[in-house]
Amino acid sequence: MNVFYQTIISRGNYMAEESKISDELMERINAFGKAIVESEEYRNLIQCDEELNKNQGAQDLLGEYRMKQLELQRKGFDRKVLNELNDLEEQMKNNETLAKLENSQKALAALFRSSNDLISEKIGQPFAQRLGGCR
């Protein structure tokens, strides 16, 4: 059993204790968590993450990009840093490992959005509200 699924189950059991979720609903929540973990989208994300862990060049590029993002946040608008960030972003798009990882993240996020939409439809009201951020 992988860590993600263990987390879902442990959090689910905690939620059941706190909010008195019925055993039947808890079983369905656990089944849903298991279905996510067994989905092609999730398995692909895990595979891409493993590929990233084996690719030091891609890790370095991602690390450099994140550091540059922090630098831009600390300094505020800085044309030079922004240009460097844009250059790094272009390099990341051209890096096969990072491009696959980004696509797998997008696919899993789409699965979550679709799941949310279906749950919302079934219960007749929004299930999870978006509180901002990018889609």
Image (spheres, helix red, strand yellow):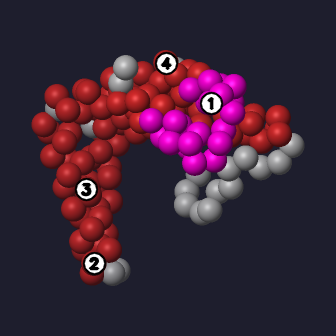
Q: Do the numbered discs 3 and 1 sit on residues whose CB atoms are within 8 Å?
A: no
Which of discs 4 and 3 lies nearer the camera? The answer is: 4
Most foreground residue, 115 or 28:
28
Q: Which amino acid type is marked by label 4?
A: Glu
Query: Mainly helix, strand or loop, the magenta region?
Result: helix
Disc 3 or 1, which lies upstream in sequence? 1
Residue 44 figure quarter: top left
Foreground: disc 2 or disc 4 = 4
Query: Which kind of residue does numbered mark 2 sit on?
Result: Arg
Where does residue 24 sit, x and y in percent of width and height?
69, 25
Ranked by sequence position, the earlier of labels 1 and 2 is: 1
Q: What secondary structure is marked by label 2?
A: helix
On residue 9, which mark appears?
none
How crowded is the residue under tag 2: few (<14 C-alpha within 10 Å), some, or many (20+)? few
Pointer 3 or 2: first along the chain: 3
Label 1 and label 4: CA atoms lie apart by: 18 Å
Contact (Cβ within 8 Å) of mark 1 with mark 2: no
Q: Which mark is residue 38?
A: 4
Q: Which residue is mark 2?
A: 74
Tell me the number on the disc at residue 26: 1
Residue 75 highlighted magenta (yes or no): no
- Helix, strand or loop status at disc 1: helix
- The numbered mark, 2 or 4, whose residue comes first in the sequence reads 4
For the record, the magenta segment spans 10-30
Q: Name which residue lies at 47% across and 24% down.
A: 37
Q: Residue at x 62, y 24 (%)?
A: 27
Residue occupied by mark 3: 65
Foreground mark, 1 or 4, reads 1
Q: Amino acid at mark 3?
A: Tyr
